[in-house]
């Protein structure tokens, strides 16, 4: 029984986390099937999701932590600009924009000796 005593908090966290998020996923599936693609509710959800992503990206650029904290602000802003340009140049493919931004940041850090 001593082996299980060290694992039960992790099992509890996994089960509680799964239950807490899975309910919302199923409710989203049920509600999503009944919504029209051009409905006001779905437009609001898209706007909130976009705002959340923008806030996370802004936080990562302006107040980075970890390794990203060592990079200069101009390099982080330049990487975002290159990524956005690549995104629009590649017919709005997110993978292209993300890859371009990461490659620009990595190249800049390498050239600066980080």
Image (cartoon, rainbow, N blue to C red):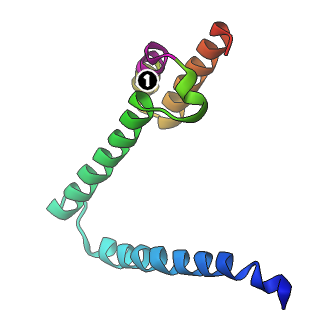
**Residue sitting farthest toward the top:** 111
Answer left or right for 9 relative to 19.
right
Q: Is residue 113 above or below residue 65?
A: above
Residue in the foreground of this view, choosing between 73 and 21? 73
Residue 43 falls in which quadrant of the image?
Answer: bottom left
Q: Position of residue 16 (x, y in %)?
A: 53, 80
Q: Position of residue 82 (x, y in %)?
A: 46, 18
Q: Position of residue 74 (x, y in %)?
A: 44, 13
Q: Is residue 97 above or below residue 31?
A: above
Residue found 84% across the figure and 91% down from its top = 1
Residue found 54% across the figure and 20% down from its top = 71
Give the residues drawn in magenta, as a range. 72-81
Task: State the SS at label 1.
Answer: helix
Q: Which image quarter holds the C terminus? A: top right
Residue found 33% across the figure and 48% down from its top = 52
Was residue 76 drawn as part of the magenta stretch in this picture? yes
Was residue 3 drawn as part of the magenta stretch in this picture? no
Main SS type for the magenta part?
helix
Q: Is residue 2 above or below residue 13?
A: below
Name the residue that disc number 1 marks.
80
């Amino acid at each position: 029984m001593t082996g299980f005593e060290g694992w039960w908090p992790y099992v509890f966290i996994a089960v509680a986390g799964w239950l807490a998020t899975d309910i919302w996923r199923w409710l989203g599936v049920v509600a999503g099937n009944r919504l029209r693609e051009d409905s006001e509710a779905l437009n609001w959800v898209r706007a909130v999701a976009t705002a959340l992503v923008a806030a996370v990206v802004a936080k990562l650029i302006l107040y980075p932590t970890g390794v990203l904290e060592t990079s200069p602000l101009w390099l982080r802003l330049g990487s975002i600009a290159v990524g956005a340009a690549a995104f629009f140049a590649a017919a709005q493919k997110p993978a292209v924009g993300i890859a371009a931004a990461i490659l620009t940041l990595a190249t800049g850090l390498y050239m600066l000796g980080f």
